[in-house]
Amino acid sequence: METTTTAAPWRAPRFWLFLQVLARGVVGLLARLRVTGDVPDDLRHGPLILAANHINPFDPVVLTAACRVRRIAPRIMATGGVFRAPIVGSAMRASGHIRVDRRTPSVGLALEHAAVAVAQGSVVLVYPEGRMGLDPGMWPERGKTGTARLAFASGATVVPVAQWGAHEVLPYAAPTGMLRSVGRAMLRRPVIRVHFGPPVDLTGIDPASPGAAARATDAIIEALTVTLAPLRPDEPDRPRYVDPTRPTEIRRQHRRRHPDSTAGT
């Protein structure tokens, strides 16, 4: 995939920077945000790929707030349904985010657009699982190969960003049950933790070799799993808080290379 471009480096629109500040306020109203880890200073404004776990409808807001804390303004790869929403869709387009039309013939365009964005010096935030995970223990699922292919196409560094606690703010089935859940969160203000881990080492994988994207995807998901483990030391197998509206599925479970790593790193 060709990613060279003569376009000027991308700069975050002021509207997107405002939304980041707003997200920080919203998360602060509903929870106690704890952000740890960071990205190398020379990558803070790109080119960089942030690979995050996806557990709940609220975690995009959490990640937006966490990136604000770390002075990062990423372009988010989000499902086309978000862009079709009357108000949110307009905000996504105005902020420069990247639309992903899953299960359509045009889905490949999203990867091309993301590769160009990274080549222009952007930070791009992706969900390598490709959906909100349904693992019974809420650990990262086996990923889709899009994030690995984006890394190969752009040559950009991949940093895992693990987050935990958003599931205590909104139900999986939101907007169903949202008012009750938000009210409970405002009273309890659960702790939400976000950690920026060390870059994923993909140097030993030749992009031209058979199965390279699958091996790189496994490495990214494993790095994300290891990054998540210290955020939930008292919940190694199952979450303490169980969202009754969230379905579970074992079909895409990721087999952790070091199961005992859930005790920490």
Image: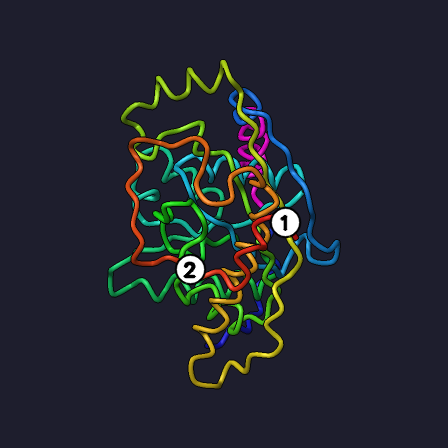
Magenta portion: prevailing SS class = helix
Neighbourhood count class around disc 2 (C-alpha, 10 Å): few under 14, some 14–19, many 20 upward: some
Q: Residue at x 41, y 45 (%)?
A: 137
Residue 78: % across, % down: 40, 49
Neighbourhood count class around disc 1 (C-alpha, 10 Å): few under 14, some 14–19, many 20 upward: some
Residue 27: % across, % down: 54, 27
Q: How is the image coloured?
A: rainbow
* Farthest residue, direction left: 104
Q: Earlier in the sequence, mark 2 or mark 1?
A: 2
Q: Residue at x 36, y 51 (%)?
A: 131
Mark 2: amino acid: His
State which mark lies toward you, 2 or 1.
1
Q: Compare residues 57 and 87 and report the one nearer the observer.
A: 57
Residue 11: % across, % down: 60, 50
Which of the 4 image quarters holds residue 206? bottom right
Contact between labelled residues 1 and 2, with CB atoms less than 8 Å apart: no
* Farthest residue, direction right: 41
| Separation (CA) of disc 2 from disc 1 | 18 Å
Numbered badge on residue 67: none
Numbered badge on residue 264: 1
Residue 233: % across, % down: 58, 41
Residue under label 2: 254
- The image shows residue 158, relative to residue 39, as above or below, that is below
Quick check: 181 left or right of 193?
left
Q: Determine the secondary structure under disc 2.
A: loop
Q: Determine the secondary structure under disc 1.
A: loop
Quick check: 11 left or right of 243?
right
* Farthest residue, direction front: 260
Which portion, as a residue range, is magenta?
A: 12-25
Which of the 4 image quarters holds residue 73? top right
